[in-house]
Image: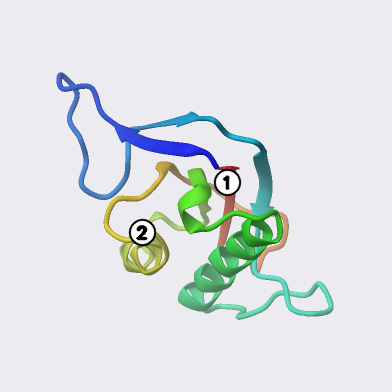
Amino acid sequence: MAKIEKLSAKSVYDPPAYSQVIKVTGAQSILFLAGQVSYDKTGGVLHPGDFKGQAREVFRALLAHVKAAGGTVESIVKVNTYLTDIRYRADLVPIREEIFGKKLPASTLVAVQALAHPDWLIEVEAIAAI
């Protein structure tokens, strides 16, 4: 099983909402998860216009993929989040904390002009170590 440690150089500010550095040793597998969006069962958009619903579905899908590979939420070491409106950040933080707790994996948040479908509001990609 992988050993996953959260680090931060003492000379660098350590934000309370995410980890600056994740060190992984002894991993048997590394998963690179493509950007997940809020799909319904037919490939359409699930929760159109509902950012919170889409965000919860995106994280549910990420975690389902990790579990299918034998990992847990703690296996997720890096997430990149893309929002179509930076104002969604306020709604995103508590949803991420529902999944990861207060100290998240290493993380990047970017506002983008658009995603592949105009009704998608969030896309998240991840790396997991198992």
Q: Nearer the viewer, residue 72 or 126?
A: 72
* Amino acid residing under circle 2: Arg
**SS at circle 2:** helix
Q: How many residues crowd around disc 1 within 10 Å: few (fewer than 14), some, or many (20 or more)?
A: many
Residue 49, horizontal then vertical, whole percent: 55, 78
Lower position in the chain sequence, tag 1 or tag 2: 2
- Quadrant position of residue 71: bottom right
For the rendered model, the colour scheme is rainbow
Tell me, for residue 21, which label it has, or none. Answer: none
Relative to 26, is 92 above or below? below
* Amino acid residing under circle 1: Ala
Q: Is 122 positioned to the left or the right of 101 in the image? A: right
Tell me, for residue 89, which label it has, or none. Answer: 2
Please state which of the two labelled residues, at mark 1 or mark 2, is closer to the viewer: 1
Q: Nearer the viewer, residue 44 or 61?
A: 61
**SS at circle 1:** strand
Furthest-right residue in this view: 42
Look at 63% across and 61% down and name the residue there: 67
Give yes or no for contact between labels 1 and 2 (Cβ–Cβ under 8 Å): no
* Residue identifier under label 1: 126
Residue 81, horizontal then vertical, whole percent: 50, 49
Look at 46% across and 75% down and name the residue there: 52
Residue 58, horizontal then vertical, whole percent: 58, 65
Find the distance from the CA under tag 1 to the CA under tag 2: 18 Å
Look at 34% across and 63% down and name the residue there: 97
The N terminus, quarter of image? top right
Q: Is 51 positioned to the left or the right of 96 in the image? A: right
Furthest-top residue in this view: 11
Q: How many residues crowd around disc 2 within 10 Å: few (fewer than 14), some, or many (20 or more)?
A: some
The C terminus, quarter of image? top right
Residue 50, horizontal then vertical, whole percent: 52, 79
